[in-house]
């Protein structure tokens, strides 16, 4: 019976993979941010054959958030150069491939916690079903950058687990530093992964040095954007005191509304929140790394929303699903570990 | 019979998974329909500014007209 269930899960995961591949094939340009930001800037690189400063300064393309770091468009443009033209329908297949890599890493991560094959498959299936992930992997958000921040977070959790098991501490630190450097050049929030260094089982001095090195590309890009006067279409402000509380309530309200959005998350969030309230886990990695990293990174996102020059009503609703999926490796692992504790033995062994 | 909290959580996780199975069936049907009747590909005339009444079409116009001599 369990064997049939195992094959059923494998089939359903495969169905999701075909679903995102089909979406990528039939709707390669479905996302407004893909054509307005990421693929547009890749085209800037390709057309200018170098650093596309003139394009970035052109007010016609201000929607592209010219001050965003440029690693992803640059990488896409390298593919354009290799393929000999702007071939979006081919390049966007990076997204379903990333989805497959994410599911594989999630499965391996769960196996690293001694989940049985069937339990690891159940949780991999649950993860693969989350709508914001499917959207980024090959449906309405294909061509955007968030899936790579998710991948970066997931890789950091995966490497950190190895480090907690007393394996590859030096190599692990180097890899995490590299991931933070790359993630910070994909999107601003990539730099939030820096927080995870605090909770790694390495000496304080190493944490400080790694933290400083991780920050270098982020600082260089921001300095360059300032020096080259690349326009910035939004920034940060300190709202008047009387506006702070309404902003906090608005952000919390929009997050809540997203969490109960059944089309995106089904009943994941109520189940997860109930699990946190009712269940306890003795897992050290969860307590010392996953939960603190998750809480501080979430707080940083909250601070960005709070002090952004864009009003929460405009900023939070269209972006919160992608923010929640970016940090999903932390809370999903938390959820999986809590449920593992109460599973019947025939499933958990 | 007393319902323990672990059984309660296991119960709702089971409901959640059944819910996902239903959603998977929906995805399967959608996929089947999509493959059977492929949607029309986006066709763009880079130099025509017609029908730029939505943000999406404006960005498409910007995107496709970029680098094209009109």
Image (tube, rainbow, N blue to C red):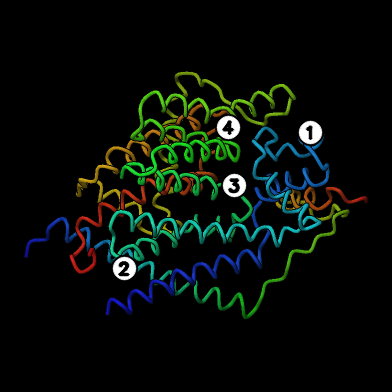
Q: Secondary structure at mark 2?
A: helix
- Do the CB atoms of the residues marked 4 and 1 lie less than 8 Å apart? no
Residue depicted at 57% across the width and 60% down the height: A97
Q: Is residue A179 visible?
A: yes
Check the image and report above or below for A55 versus A283.
above
**Which residue is nearer to you in this view: A78 or A307?**
A78
Q: CA distance from mark 2 to mark 4?
A: 45 Å
Q: CA distance from mark 1 to mark 2?
A: 52 Å
Residue depicted at 46% across the width and 47% down the height: A155
Check the image and report above or below for A264 versus A184.
below
Q: Earlier in the sequence, mark 4 or mark 1?
A: 1
Q: Secondary structure at mark 4?
A: loop
**Which residue is nearer to you in this view: A277 or A44?**
A44
Q: Earlier in the sequence, mark 3 or mark 2?
A: 2
Residue pointed to by mark 2: A118
Mark 1: give few (<14), some (14-19) or many (20+) Cα within 10 Å. Answer: some
Q: Earlier in the sequence, mark 3 or mark 4?
A: 3
Check if mark 1 and mark 2 are on a common chain. Answer: yes
Residue pointed to by mark 1: A53
Q: Chain of mark 3?
A: A
Horizontal placement of A255 versus A21: left or right? left
Tell me the mark number nearer the camera, choosing from 2 and 4: 2
Q: Chain of mark 4?
A: A
Q: Position of residue A289 (x, y in %)?
A: 33, 39
Q: Which mark is residue A310?
A: 4
Q: Which mark is residue A145?
A: 3
Residue B31 falls in image quadrant: bottom right
Q: Secondary structure at mark 3?
A: loop
């Amino acid at each position: 019976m369990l064997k049939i269930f195992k094959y059923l899960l494998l089939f359903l995961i495969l169905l999701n993979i075909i679903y995102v591949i089909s979406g990528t094939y039939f709707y390669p340009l479905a996302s407004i941010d893909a054509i307005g930001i990421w693929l547009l800037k890749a085209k800037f690189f390709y057309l200018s054959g170098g650093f596309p400063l003139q394009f970035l300064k052109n007010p016609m393309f201000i929607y592209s958030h010219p001050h965003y770091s440029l690693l992803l468009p640059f990488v896409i443009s390298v593919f354009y150069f290799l393929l000999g033209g702007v071939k979006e329908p081919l390049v966007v297949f990076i997204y379903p491939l990333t989805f497959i890599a994410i599911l594989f890493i999630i499965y391996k991560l769960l196996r690293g916690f001694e989940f049985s094959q069937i339990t690891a498959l159940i949780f991999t299936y649950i993860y693969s079903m989350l709508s914001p992930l499917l959207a980024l992997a090959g449906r309405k958000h294909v061509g955007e950058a968030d899936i790579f921040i998710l991948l970066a977070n997931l890789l950091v959790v995966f490497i950190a687990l190895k480090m907690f098991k007393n394996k590859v501490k030096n190599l692990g630190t180097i890899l995490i530093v590299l991931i933070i450097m790359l993630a910070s050049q994909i999107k601003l929030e990539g730099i939030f992964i820096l927080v995870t260094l605090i909770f790694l089982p390495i000496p304080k001095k190493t944490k400080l040095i790694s933290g400083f090195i991780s920050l270098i590309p982020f600082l260089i890009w921001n300095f360059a954007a300032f020096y080259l006067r690349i326009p910035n279409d939004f920034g940060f402000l300190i709202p008047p005191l009387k506006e702070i509380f309404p902003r906090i309530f608005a952000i919390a309200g929009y997050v809540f509304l997203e969490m109960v959005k059944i089309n995106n998350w089904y009943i994941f969030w109520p189940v997860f929140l109930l699990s946190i309230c009712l269940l306890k886990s003795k897992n050290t990695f969860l307590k010392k790394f996953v939960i603190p990293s998750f809480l501080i990174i979430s707080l940083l996102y909250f601070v960005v929303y709070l002090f952004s020059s864009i009003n929460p009503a405009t900023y939070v609703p269209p972006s919160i699903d992608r923010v929640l999926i970016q940090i999903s490796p932390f809370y999903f692992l938390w959820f999986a570990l809590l449920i593992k504790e109460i599973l019947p033995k025939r499933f958990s062994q | 019979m007393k319902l323990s909290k672990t059984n309660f959580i296991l119960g709702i996780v089971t409901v959640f998974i059944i819910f996902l199975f239903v959603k998977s069936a929906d995805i399967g049907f959608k996929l089947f329909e999509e493959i059977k009747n492929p949607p029309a590909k986006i066709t763009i005339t880079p130099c025509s500014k017609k029908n730029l009444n939505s943000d999406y079409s404006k960005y498409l116009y910007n995107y496709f007209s970029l680098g094209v001599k009109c």
